[in-house]
Image (cartoon, rainbow, N blue to C red):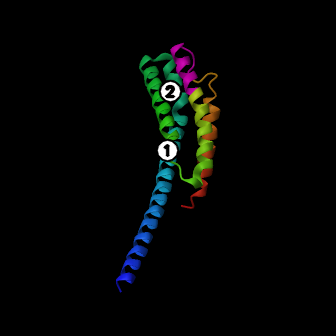
Amino acid sequence: MKKWSILLLMALTMMVTSGCGLLESVNQGVNFATETTEYMNNLDSFRQEMNGLAEQALTNLDARTDLKNKLLALKDQIMSYKNLEVPDYAKDIHATIIGYNDKLQQGLDQALTNIEQGRAAFESTGLPDTMNKINELLGQLNALNPN
C-alpha cells in the first residue's frame, strides 16, 4: 500500500511538473503575441504621424525636439523588442521583424542626423518604405486572427 502511495505521489508530481512547463510555454506564447501586437501597433501609429511631425519639425523648435524624443523612444522600443523571449513557434516571424528593426535603426539614426543638420527628417532614410513593409506584416498577422 505504501509503495502504491509513493508511486501515485510521484506520478502526480510528474504530471504537475510537466503541466507547469506547458503552462509556462503557453504564457510565453501569449506574452510574445501581446508584446508583438503592441509593438507593431506602436510602429504603425508612428508611421501614420511621421510625415506631419517631420513637416512641423522643419519650422518649429518644439516640434523638432518632440520628434527627436519620439525617434529616441522608438529606438528604445526596438531594442526592447529585440530582447523579447520568443517561443519556438514564433522564431521565424520574430526574425523577420528583427530584420526590419535593423533597417529601422539605421533609418532612425539617419533621421536624427538629418534633424541635427536642419534637413527634412526622413530624407534618404528608407523609413517610409520600411514602415510600410512593417504595416503590411501587421496586416498579415491581423488576418491570422479570426476575431
Q: Earlier in the sequence, mark 1 or mark 2?
A: 2
Going by the picture, which residue comes out furthest to the front? 3
Work out whether residue 139 can be spotted: no
Q: Secondary structure at mark 2?
A: helix
Q: Amino acid at mark 2?
A: Leu
Residue 20 locus on image (x, y percent): 43, 63
Disc number for residue 84: 1
Viewer-side label of 1, 2: 1
Q: Amino acid at mark 1?
A: Leu
Above or below for 27 versus 84: below
Q: CA distance from mark 1 to mark 2?
A: 29 Å
Where is residue 13, by image quadrant? bottom left
Residue 3 locus on image (x, y percent): 38, 82
Above or below for 53 versus 17: above
Going by the picture, which residue comes out furthest to the top? 117
Name the side, left or right, on which 84 lies relative to 96: left
The answer to if 5 sits in the magenta stretch is no
Q: Which stretch is magenta?
A: 107-121
Q: In this figure, which residue is indicated by the disc labeled 2?
A: 53
Residue 134 locus on image (x, y percent): 60, 41
- For the residue pair 11 and 82, the one nearer the viewer reads as 11
Q: Main secondary structure of the magenta part?
A: helix
Where is residue 106, by image quadrant? top right
Q: Are marks 1 and 2 in contact (CB under 8 Å)?
A: no
Above or below for 101 versus 16: above
Number of labelled discs?
Answer: 2
Q: Quadrant of the N terminus?
A: bottom left
